[in-house]
Image: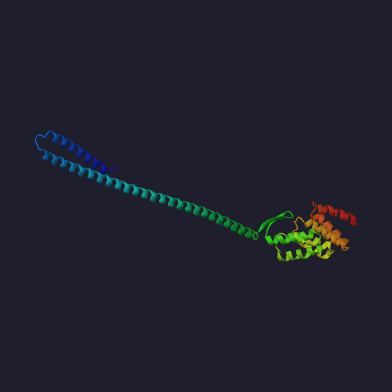
Amino acid sequence: MSSVSSKAMSRFLHALCTVSLALGAASASAGLFDDEEARKAILDLRQRVEVVRQQAEQATEQGASRASEENAALRRSMLDLQNQIETLRSETAKLRGMNEQLSRDIADMQRVQKDLAQGVDNRLRQFEPVKVSVDGREFMVEPAEKREFEAALAVFRKGDFAAAQPLFFDFLRRYAQSGYSASALFWLGNAQYATRDYKEAVINFRALIAREPTHLRAPESVLSIANCQIELKDSKGARATLDDLIKAYPQSEAAAAAKDRLARLK
């Protein structure tokens, strides 16, 4: 009950008390007034009580109506607040979903960038010089240079000596200053020896020795020259070559083989 209703009720009770006192006073003084005046006084008091009662009821109804309106307004406010909370929840969920999607997109983009960078690195690496070790020597070569030398050597090792020769020729023409050059000359000479092209083989073995006399294949090249000379029926030249081999590379396996050859030639 509102404060207005409480006040109206208080006034009503006060009026009742007043009427009760007035009635008591009227009864006590009945001897002093005649009946007509007493009736008027009672009627007046009743009217006053009725007015107060009606005011109290009106105030009570107004208070109840106001309380109902206030309750309705409060319910509407609560409903609006609940709707706002649900809206915020929905927007929060939407933002969370957008954030998760954005995180996935960023992760995907980073993976793509990483793959692209790796691909670029791999492509660039195909053109970067690489270190190789051949016949006891280490040097830097271009990737294409390495591929071509290894391809020619693979053909030689398959026993296709005729097909290997143009590959080594082309390699030496294209990469004249390559670290592979001495090795290429050695295998080219061996391919020519295998196809009985002894004179050309001697030329390439001698080119190797002149180019790199300390090369690991140099002693073998000198021995191969002697073998070519033997095949060409040049025994005198072969003996001179074998003597030179023993003097130039006395500790080599080729020198030991040269001594055996000399013994057989004599």
Q: Which residue is situated farthest in the front direction here? A: 35
Q: How is the image coloured?
A: rainbow
Q: Residue at x 56, y 55 (%)?
A: 108
Residue 83 can be seen, yes or no: yes
The residue lying at 13 percent from left, 36 percent from top is 26
The quadrant where residue 172 appears: bottom right
Q: Pinpoint residue 143: horizontal percent, then vertical percent.
A: 68, 60
Indicate the quadrant containing the N terminus: top left, top right, bottom left or bottom right.
Answer: top left
Image side of residue 40 versus residue 111, left or right: left
Q: Quadrant of the C terminus?
A: bottom right
Give the camera-side residue of 86 and 3. 3
Q: How many marks?
A: 0
Q: Residue furthest top?
A: 28
x%, y% of residue 170? Answer: 74, 66
Closest to the observer: 14 or 76?
14
Q: Position of residue 263 (x, y in %)?
A: 89, 54
Vertical side of 230 occupied by 64: above or below: above
- Please say if 259 is above or below 145: above
Instruction: Choose top left, top right, bottom left or bottom right for residue 122.
Output: bottom right
Quarter of the image for residue 52 reads top left
Question: Which of these two is toward me, 120 or 179?
Answer: 120
Can you give x and y, in whole percent of width and height, for residue 240 in the image? 84, 59
Viewer can see residue 208:
no
